[in-house]
Amino acid sequence: MSLLVQLDLAPTDEPRHSRPAPDRLIAGDPAFKTWAQDASRDDTVKTGIWEATPGETRSIKGETFEFCYILSGVVELTEEGKAPRIFRAGDSFVMKPGYVGVWKTIETVRKIYVVVG
């Protein structure tokens, strides 16, 4: 196994399909696709591509750290007690452990993710 992993930004294999848990859904009917591409350190570090259709969900990171790089689309993230922030293709951000807020997908979004925890 190589220790250098190139991510496929336009995967053609079948993704894992999911929807938000009912207690996390705020508005709309978002659908998610996940193309997991790598896992390391006993599955505590995960990397891949994720896509979501428009809708609003509650985002709760718990003990996980997540880095995101937006490949396409537009999202609005609102951390509890903070002003909304817009992220578009080419933007990146980190949600640290303890983050709680609202993830609003305005235009279908596709991102690279790295989750630790």
Image (cartoon, rainbow, N blue to C red):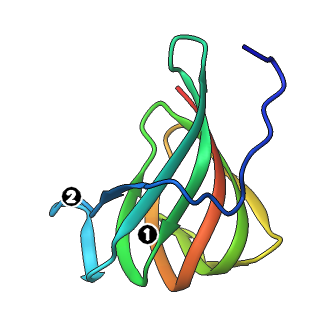
In the rendered image, residue 41, in percent from the top left (x then y), is placed at 60, 12
Examine the rendering and report whether any part of residue 26 can be seen.
yes
In the rendered image, residue 98, in percent from the top left (x then y), is placed at 49, 41
**Residue at the spot x=25%, y=62% of the render?**
24
Q: Which residue is mark 2?
A: 21
Looking at this view, name the residue that lies furthest to the left: 22
Q: Which quadrant of the figure has residue 92?
A: bottom right
The three-letter code of the residue at mark 1 reads: Val
Nearer-the-camera pick, 99 or 114: 114
Q: Which quadrant of the figure has residue 84?
A: bottom right
Asked which secondary structure carries label 1, the reply is strand
**Residue at the spot x=21%, y=58% of the render?**
21
**Residue at the spot x=45%, y=44% of the render?**
61
Q: Which residue is mark 1?
A: 102
Nearer-the-camera pick, 66 or 41: 41
Q: Quadrant of the N terminus?
A: top right
**Residue at the spot x=52%, y=25% of the render?**
117
Question: Which numbered disc, 1 or 2, marks the residue that appears first in the sequence?
Answer: 2
In the rendered image, residue 4, in percent from the top left (x then y), is placed at 84, 25
Circle number at residue 60: none
The three-letter code of the residue at mark 2 reads: Ala
